[in-house]
Amino acid sequence: MSAVADMREFDRVPHGADANPRAAADVLRDRAAQAAAVRRQLADVIGEAATDDGLLQAKVGAGGLQELYIAPRAMRMPSTDLAVAIVELARQAREDLDRRRHELASEHGVARGGVDLDESLARLEQLRGLVADSYGDMRRAYERFREQAGP
């Protein structure tokens, strides 16, 4: 497994009355960074396909068809046959891309639909609010203690 942590840990964020808001915020921040790293890796994956004779080769990435190799001998094919072969090759390369992405996502425990970063960031903001509120409550309690304890 790569340096990116297993995303199945994402759901193990401490929550509830017993949870330490700072620790939960740290976990969420780490998980969001890991999810972003997995997303970048998924965006860099390339799917490949080639005809059995090697006359046509295609590479497909996140942006679509990235490379197309047509051997000079393939140019002798009727244009309609060549066009059909290219379309089929691009489809196969796309299937290879989808398969590779699925394998990579599975290695990192990312659900098939991916990690919802917007939802995760919203939870992180909620936890930041809790931490800030808790800090304010603690500070007020400390100030009250100091007042009662005297100089």
Image: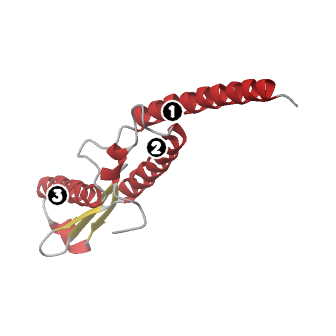
Q: Nearer the viewer, mark 2 or mark 3?
A: 2
Q: Are marks 2 and 1 in contact (CB under 8 Å)?
A: yes
* Amino acid on which disc 1 is placed: Leu
Q: Position of residue 102 (x, y in %)?
A: 23, 55
What separation in Å lies between label 2 and label 3 (alpha carbons)?
38 Å
Would residue 144 appear left or right of 60 to someone viewing this image? right
Rounded to the nearest whole Å, what is the CA distance between mark 2 and mark 1? 9 Å
Tell me if 67 is positioned left or right of 29 in this view: left
Q: Give whichever of discs 2 and 3 has the lower sequence position.
A: 2
Q: Relative to residue 72, is residue 35 depicted above or below?
A: above
In the foreground, 35 or 78 = 35
Indicate whether 65 appears above or below 120.
below
Please, what is the three-letter code of the amino acid marked with disc 3? Gln
Label 1 sits on residue: 127
**Which corner quadrant holds the C terminus?**
top right
2 vs 31: above or below: below
Residue at 40%, 41% (x, y): give it: 14
Residue 83 placement (x, y as % from top left): 18, 54
Q: What kind of residue is marked 2?
A: Leu
73 and 43: which one is in front?
A: 43
Residue 117 x/y as whole percent: 42, 38
Q: Earlier in the sequence, mark 1 or mark 3?
A: 3
